[in-house]
Amino acid sequence: MSGASLSPVLKQATPVVVDHAAGSWIHGTDGRRYLDFTTGIGVTSTGHCHPDVVAAAQEQCTKIIHAQYTTVMHQPLLRLTERLGDFLPDGIDSVFYANSGSEAVEAAVRLARMATGRQYIVTVQRGFHGRTVAAASLTTAGTKFSAGFGPLMSGVATTPFPDALRLGMTTDDAVDHALKEFDYLLATRLSPSELAAVVIEPFLGDGGYLAVPPAYLAGLRERTARHGALLVLDEVQAGVGRTGRFWGHQHTDGLVPDVIITAKGIASGFPISAIAAPEAIMAKAWPGSQGGTYGGNAVAAAAGVATLDVIEREGLVENSRVRGAELLDGLRSGLAGIDQICDIRGTGLMLAVEFGDPTANAGGPRAIEAARLASSVQQACIDEDLLTLTCGPTGSIVRLIPALVVTADEVVTGTERFVRAVRRVVEM
Ligand SMILES: Cc1ncc(COP(=O)(O)O)c(C=O)c1O
């Protein structure tokens, strides 16, 4: 008997094997203590193993673990729904639960098609919406998310992102350009009468930690409403306080989407996701059209309620805004004058440092060198006992995603470690 090993399809960004973790810190089996600025890709919103979240999950485990929600209903899901209602925009009052972000994206696609009776989903270039085949069909944050297992789902068209940095344009010009291209798509590829929904992240996640300009989101809102299509906001990464507001789209004044997709930070690490929409939209799908064995798990839902309570009680959305601004300032001053860095940006605790020349050809040697730099910095951070991740279509960006409970001292420590790692790489 030789035992089994993990599949090589899993690619791990660090060599760390976790022994235990608390707050912003991960303790490895190697005896080292890492400052975690990855939070499981933006998931452990209240930090690792927040005592209230642990207690809620432990208590729920003694009552019922799996109360299958198409068979029996359980109290944590009813409580979570009520609690989520305190954070959802007015009128978005009906919630369906799944397990992962990808599943929720698929649920939103199903809902949009059933509610409108139309087929086409428009997705925005550089968006990341997940790895299941339908979610990957909406993903244009890099070919690594779809290469080799096509054909992908049909009925998807892509419209350009207002990519000011990459196009070397002002934001206003990039928004104008992208909205014209969206209108052109509806004049050349699919008729507005076939458009079920536009799906967009309010802040690009894996596509590069970039804010979507409010004028672009507002432009899409106006157009989807005019064409009788839905505006679906994928808040899986940007939602739940990550950007210093509870929802990422709240940075666009007055924007009310038709569907919100949430996951990740909602339950501090327990797998649960949701789509939320007005009851009138949800009611257009037939009962039983959505479901699943594990969706809306009782322990995850109890952890979700505790997570929302902690976020509110500890003022974590505000902490995200304040600590994020401190981290951004620290990075900007610590990394000033490094030619290989083209942009240091962030909103709340969704921060990024981009390397190379963003206007360079994506397949060319300068883009490859930028990706090498970003990857070297991410690896050098591990030597500093700081965990970070890369992102972006060509891998030229290092992202920092601290827990919403991160303290001012931890921000200083993280900044110092990151700056040391970057300097070591660029001075090599
Ligand atoms: C914006 C966004 N949507 C969807 C997903 C997919 O979520 P999951 O990995 O839970 O399937 C992710 C994951 O990173 C994401 O960031």
Image (cartoon, grey):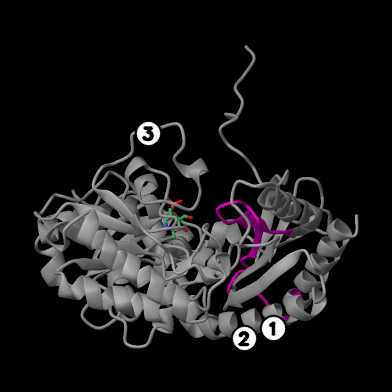
Residue on which the image places disc 1: 326
Left or right, 344 with reference to 140: right
- How far apart are labels 3 and 1 at the CA level? 43 Å
Instruction: Confirm whether the magenta stretch covers residue 303.
Output: no
What residue is rendered at 44% in x and 51% in y? Answer: 140
Find numbered disc 1 in the image and state the secondary structure of the residue it sits on.
helix
Residue on which the image places disc 3: 150
Q: Quadrant of residue 338?
A: bottom right
- Closer to the chain start, of discs 3 and 1, is 3
What residue is rendered at 39% in x and 81% in y? Answer: 215
In the rendered structure, are the residues bearing label 1 and label 2 in contact, judged by CB atoms less than 8 Å apart? Answer: yes
Left or right, 247 with reference to 421: left
Residue on which the image places disc 2: 322
Question: Does 399 appear above or below 416?
Answer: above
Q: Amino acid at mark 3?
A: Gly
**Which quadrant holds the C terminus?**
bottom right
Left or right, 299 with reference to 276: right
Ligand 1 is found in which quarter of the picture?
Answer: bottom left
Q: Amino acid at mark 1?
A: Glu
